Amino acid sequence: MLKTLSCTFLLATACAAQANVIEGFDDVAGLAAHGFILRNASTPTGANAFFQGNSRVFGAHDGAPTAYLGANYDSAGAGGVIDDWLISPAFSTSGGGVVSFYVRAGAEPGYLDSFQYGLSAGGTGAGDFVLGALATASTGDWTRYSLAFAGTGMPGTVGRFALRYTGPADSANYIGIDTLTIDTLPLPEPASVALLALGLAGVAASRRRKRA
C-alpha cells in the first residue's frame, strides 16, 4: 500500500507513462524518416516486403482503411522462407515500460501467417534481438499483443522493438500490423526521489513511535 501511495502522491509526475513512440502506419513510405527500419532478409528475396495496407483484404485497426503495415507470401520467392523485419526507433528503457501493437491475418483458408517479436539493447541486427516464440496471426479480427520491459535505472539506456514476419512462403498468406505504441516510464526527478525518501522516513518514524 505504501508503494502505491508513494507513486500516486509523491511521484505523480515521475510515475506517469509517456507515449514515446506511437505509429499508426498512415504512411509506410515515410517510416524511415521517423527512425523505423524495414528489412527484408527472406531467402530468396521475393517481389514485395512490408507495404501500405490493402483495404481489399481487410481494413486498418484504426484510422483510414489502408493505414496499417502489410506483408504477404511475396516477401520470399516460391519455395523460400519469409524473414521480414519491422524495427522501431531507439527508445529509453531506463524506467521500464510496455510495447503494444495489433496484428491480423488474411482470412483465406489453408494458410498460416507466423511472427515473433522482442527487444534489443539498441542494436538493429537480427542477432541483437531476443525474440519470443512464434505466434500465429488471427484471421478473425485485430488482436492486441503487449511486451513489458523492466528498467535498468541507468540514464541513457536504450532499446529497440522488432516484429519479425516469418515462415514458409508457400504456406503463408497476408499479415497486417497496426497501432504500435511504446509507453516508457521516466526515471524519477532528483527532487521527487528526495521527497519520497522524506515520506518513507516519516512513515518509519511513525512506526517507531507506535512501537514505543
Image (cartoon, rainbow, N blue to C red):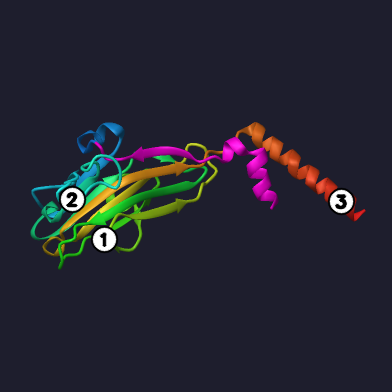
Which one is earlier in the sequence, the residue at label 3 or at label 2? Answer: 2
Tag 3: residue type? Arg
Numbered tag placed on residue 63 in the rendering: none
91 left or right of 139? right
- For disc 1, the marked residue is 140
Which one is earlier in the sequence, the residue at label 2 or at label 1? Answer: 2
Q: Work out whether residue 159 can be spotted.
A: no
78 up-or-down from 177: above or below:
below
201 left or right of 114? right
119 left or right of 8? left
Residue at 69% x, 53% y: name it: 1
Residue 102 lies in the magenta stretch: no
Span of residues in magenta: 1-26
- Front position in the image: 57 or 206: 57
Tag 1: residue type? Gly
136 up-or-down from 142: above or below:
below
Residue 7 lies in the magenta stretch: yes
Q: CA distance from mark 1 to mark 3?
A: 59 Å
Mark 2: give few (<14), some (14-19) or many (20+) Cα within 10 Å: many
- Image quarter of residue 140: bottom left
Of the residues tagged 2 and 1, which is closer to the observer?
A: 1
Numbered tag placed on residue 71 in the rendering: 2
- Image quarter of residue 88: top left
- For disc 3, the marked residue is 208
174 left or right of 132? left
Residue at 48% x, 37% y: name it: 156
Residue at 12% x, 47% y: name it: 48
Q: Residue furthest right?
A: 212
- Front position in the image: 154 or 151: 151
Of the residues tagged 1 and 3, which is closer to the observer?
A: 1
Tag 2: residue type? Ala
